[in-house]
Image (cartoon, grey):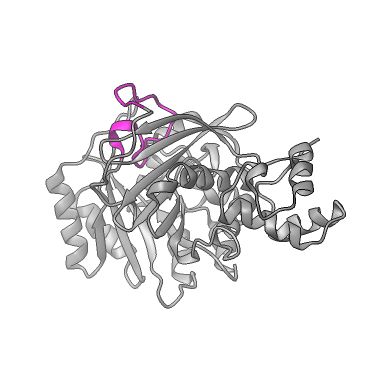
Amino acid sequence: MATRLLGLTREELRRLAEQWGLPAYRGSQLYHALYAERRFDFAQMSNLPRALRERLERDAVVGLPRTDKRFVSSDGTVRYLLRLDDGKTVETVWMPEGGRQTLCLSTQAGCAVLCRFCATGLLGLLRNLSAAEIVGQVLVALEDNRERLQPATNIVLMGQGEPLLNYDATLRAVRLMADPEGMSIPWRRITLSTSGILPGIRRLAAEPQRPKLAISLNATSEEQRRELMPMTRKYHLAELMDACRLYPLRPWERLTFEYVLLGGVNDSRLDAERLIRLLAGLRAKVNLIPWNPTPSLPFTAPDPEHVAKFQQALRDAGLLAFIRKPRGQDIYAACGQLASLEAPSVQPSAPPGPASASPPA
């Protein structure tokens, strides 16, 4: 059976080289070729001797997910529908802007959290992704855009799935992304978003190195949150806020709270006042996300005037509050829209155009 290389660490590849009777440094060279240079054809790994390249052709595979479909938005966003070895699909979103690109990654196929306003919840949980399948999304998107890469890459674990319900694979993938010997994406440019899985938040707080944390809040009372995010009934709002207050922020860091605004549901002045009280004393910022229309979901987008007033109320109280501009809405690539939906009006083969809005903070 062929050895799958993607997802293996530098040390694991060094051990593989030794098992094959080669110096360990050959494993380091292979690691660099895969993760830093993004070479996926063994014949093109010119830093390796021919005998090793031939051995790799016989006994190993890289293991990248396959691009099944590629949808390009009018704003330059690209949604990738990636097919995994078992036939399941996940989605990755590429958002270019200015001097950076932001990649929105999935950590599960489907999702178990079942938020009422999110299309991914309609899929249910199909399975967790492996570290290789998470890292593979980054490599596919970066390679597809090799000629257009900007100096900085941001990673947001905000696609399909709840990262903290797939903790070990997600953190293994993040460590591979952040390794300066490989992909070299700085820790502070990687953000993990959770619906509020308390054991995972506490575990993440104890990590010696960790990504930034974003909390998907979306409600300002226990009853409201249970209704919108049924799985969070296990983790009460008061306990979540206590965990946030105990979370060890680094000197440069703020907790991010994501708040999806649903028209007539959670966008009132009273909601804004309750949110201000919830976040009192926290070093935080709030990303306000006007709900993105999605087929089959019984919600409406909020009135832009309500959104502006909600933001102003938070700012008047001294909170950092931003309105997230939708990206890729026309190809079902915006926040809450990822459910492997078709976008028939978009030509998958069209090249990305210039960006016109800000990716997630």
Residue 84: horizontal and vertical position, in percent? 59, 32
Q: Is residue 345 magenta?
A: yes
Quarter location, residue 12: bottom right
Which residue is situated farthest in the left direction here?
305
Q: Nearer the viewer, residue 251 or 78?
A: 78
Q: Which of the image's four quarters has the C terminus?
A: bottom left
Residue 171: horizontal and vertical position, in percent? 59, 56
- Report the predominant secondary structure element of the magenta stretch: loop
Residue 157: horizontal and vertical position, in percent? 47, 50
> Which residue does the image show at 20% across and 49% down from the upper left?
268
Q: Is residue 58 magenta?
A: no
Q: Is residue 68 above or below residue 136?
A: above
Which residue is situated farthest in the bottom direction here?
251
Q: Is residue 342 left or right of residue 302?
A: right
Can the viewer see residue 9? no
Which residue is situated farthest in the top direction here?
344
Quarter location, residue 322: bottom left
Residue 81: horizontal and vertical position, in percent? 47, 32
Q: Is residue 68 left or right of residue 25?
A: left
Q: Nearer the viewer, residue 265 or 152?
A: 152
Can the viewer see residue 337? yes
Quarter location, residue 86: top right
Q: Is residue 231 left or right of residue 224?
A: right
Magenta part of the chain:
328-347
> Which residue does the image show at 53% across and 60% down from the upper left?
201
